[in-house]
Amino acid sequence: MLGATRRVTALIPRRLQPLRELHEDIEESIHFHKTKGQHILTNPRILDTIVRKSAINPTDTVLEIGPGTGNLTLKLLEASHEVIAIEIDHRMVNILENRTHKRGLRNKLRLITKDALRTEFPPFDLVVANIPYSISSPLLIKLLYGTTPFRSATLLLQKEFARRLLANPGDSEFNRLAVNVKLLADVEFVMDVSKRDFLPPPKVDSSVVIIRPKAKIPTVDLHQWRAFTRTCFNNKNKTLGATFKSKRKVFELLELNNASGLIRQQDDFCSLKEKIIGVLREGGFDDKRPSKLSIEELLHLMSLFNQVGVYFDHHGEVGNEDDRFEVDDVDD
């Protein structure tokens, strides 16, 4: 469909006049890159619903990641005090500048032409964005585990990805991503969005969710937590006993804990394995599967391991204050 470069308006059927009007002021010819997640939301009803559900105040600064041609951006600018738009594609940046200038909104738009995953976010109140599918997981972890507080994030995500965020223990979609998000935030389903509402259309449908950071979160080292859940959910349907007592895993933990200086005496393989067996038996976790456990149960298990000197990350013991997001520290 997009093998050749064509005017945006030429790609929209004339019978869909409202959709044509969204892009009528784009003078440049443009080619969207599907491989980069450039799928532009064109349905005005969906755009309006996203803005309304985001509950934007006139004094709010909104962070938008991957604004594309600016269909959502223009509506966000009308509802907020300022929009910070992070867009790595210079072609899209030019379009955004032109469209906002024509509407007299350019002074409310702050553009950052960088990679969102490797950019330090300036202060903002909430996030509203159509997230490129390829960076959904690391971007979500960066937002929640980063240092910039925010009120909510209204995100348009791949439907399957959104279902994972909404999953509960025992659900087939429940995985490490869901655990790591739900530790720090509540997730609300808003609506599904058809793939036909995008230009060019993706292969699958999407969903809108609202993520609200919790006011109170457990006192836990977040690096330890992510490393711990990475181990537990490496095979989420495998019993914890089979995971932690495997020869390979014991050797990994032995090397990590001895090299990091997280314990006072050098453990050997047998003594460490005895500690692991003791924790699993004491807590009743030996035959449990992580996909069935609540966040509270997982926190309890990690605490039991820490109490006997078994840690899962080199950053240090619980309470480490330096817990900033690292771009390579993401969920699968």
Image (cartoon, rainbow, N blue to C red):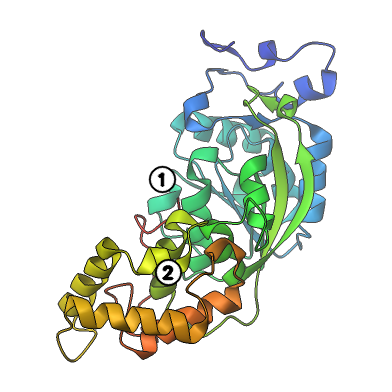
Asked if the residues shown at circle 2 and circle 1 are in contact, with their CB atoms under 8 angstroms apart, the answer is no
Q: Amino acid at mark 1?
A: Lys
Mark 1, residue position: 114
Q: Nearer the viewer, residue 49 or 280?
A: 280
Callout 2, which amino acid? Gly
For residue 317, above or below residue 194: below
Q: Residue at x 50, y 76 (%)?
A: 285
Location of mark 2 (residue): 241
Q: Who is closer to the viewer here, 30 or 39?
A: 39
SS at mark 2 in the image: helix
Residue name at image x 80 percent, y 10 percent: 14
Tell us which disc is closer to us: 2 or 1.
2
Percent x, y of residue 270: 21, 79
Crowding at label 2, few (<14), some or many (≥20) Cα neighbours within 10 Å? some
Residue 304 picture quarter: bottom left
The disc, 2 or 1, on the residue closer to the chain's N-terminal end is 1
